[in-house]
Image (cartoon, rainbow, N blue to C red):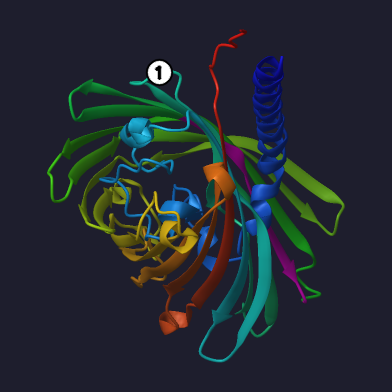
Amino acid sequence: AAKDSMIYGAFIRMKSMTSTTKISFVVAFLFSLTAFGQSSPNSVYNAYGVGRLNDFGLESFQSMGNASIGMRSDNMVNLKNPAALNSISYPNQIFDIGVSMSSFSQKTVDESNSTMIGGVQNINLWFKPSGRFAFTIGANQFSNTNYNVTDLYHHSDVVQNYDVIVDGTGGLSRIYFGASTELVKNLHLGGRVSLLLGQIGSTQSITNNSLIGDIELIQNSSVSQAVFDFGAQYAFERSAHDWVVGATYRPNFLLSQRVESMISEGGYDTLVTNSKSNLYLPEMYGVGVSARFGTWRVALDGELEKWSKNQGTESNRYRDKYSVSLGTEYVRGKRSESYIDRVAFRFGGSFNNYYVAVNNTKFNQIKLTTGIGLPTQRQSGYINVGYEYQGLGTTEANLVLETLHTFTLNFSIRSMWFLKTVYD
């Protein structure tokens, strides 16, 4: 009887945890679709292209500069390369949700300001129904288009000065489903379908001039597009250390935008028009390699996005984006009885040239990252804490130098699914 009670109690606990995880995922998923925008900095560079692009990955790899194209982890979900989804052997279900808090600063030659932002960063549910196949479903923010810019213009001695205020809102969210399998021994393939959807809005207002009057132009662009990306990894097993090489590819897609424009003067005369505009989401290539040396893991990535295929303006031109990422992780002993030995320490960084040259000026983006992974009791989850410094832009050519200090907190909850109940 005691044995039956123990088995039944364990089954009830497992069933309760599974149900709680499912409900938590659904609630967090719906909440995240409206909360991603809260973590968007009002960057002046969000006004170009599809806005400021976000890295694709969970905190455990973001703290390593997100260098993970060639990484296979046995306990953390790797989203950057879908071929790595089946690398986890235990447990067979992981639910991740991450939040962030940032200090955002902007600086020009003459002035500077700063603000605090925060919100949901990502949500992901990973599960592995069999030894060879693994799947993931989740959502995160693809790009940010929030910005606020005020320019002073001088038309003529008669009209004199007037202000143009431009407010940008919105961005693109990504909902994705991915899968991976081992094709032959040590060769792993993966694919993912993502739905990019959202609204990109801008409001241009002419003020502070009695002759011109108050003129306002409002534009709202709606985007909904499915995109695909693919990945591969090959693991070289060695007794002293392990090597993994990986590759990713995303073909180019045409983002068709439905644009509604409204022009009003003084709030009375209004003209509404509807049109379409297109922007290519370029093809992207990525290669990566990682190696394990005892208690250390080191990873290096390189990526290319061909944004130059898009046509910009005379002063704001698209250019191909080259990215390099480097990261490392130290864990003294994953199976040690000592708690500190099981803690993961991570460091990394990345560098890329921004994909738009603004005012015919090229500039770069740099990120420096660090973080720790704290295992919970009985290995039922991880708490990943990270910090990222990000620098973007320049004070040359009347542009803005932006810095972002971001603290992230990711909860990784683990449980067992797909188990048959056994009665004695």
* Magenta stretch holds residue 53: no
Going 58% across and 10% down the picture, which residue do you hit? 422
Going 57% across and 61% down the picture, which residue do you hit? 408
Measured as percent of width and height from the top left, residue 329 is found at 34, 60
311 lies left or right of 296 = right
Measured as percent of width and height from the top left, residue 131 is found at 36, 21
Q: Quadrant of residue 381?
A: top right
Of residues 86 and 360, the one drawn nearer to the viewer in this rendering: 86
Going 29% across and 51% down the picture, which residue do you hit? 308
Q: Which span is picked out in magenta?
A: 194-208
**Quarter the N terminus occupies:** top right
Of residues 166 and 66, the one drawn nearer to the viewer in this rendering: 66
**Quarter the C terminus occupies:** top right
Farthest residue in the bottom direction?
A: 110
* Magenta stretch holds residue 195: yes
Image height of 257 relative to 343, above or below: above
Taking the image as drawn, is residue 165 in sight? Answer: no
Other residues around mark 1 within 10 Å, as few (<14) / some (14–19) / many (≥20): few
Q: Which residue is mark 1?
A: 130
Measured as percent of width and height from the top left, residue 416 is found at 54, 27
Farthest residue in the top direction?
A: 424
186 lies left or right of 146 = left
Going 51% across and 75% down the picture, which residue do you hit? 402
Measured as percent of width and height from the top left, residue 387 is found at 51, 68
Image height of 317 relative to 1, above or below: below
Task: Please name the predominant secondary structure of the magenta segment in the image.
Answer: strand
Q: Quadrant of residue 368?
A: bottom left
Taking the image as drawn, is residue 304 in sight? Answer: yes
Farthest residue in the front direction?
A: 1
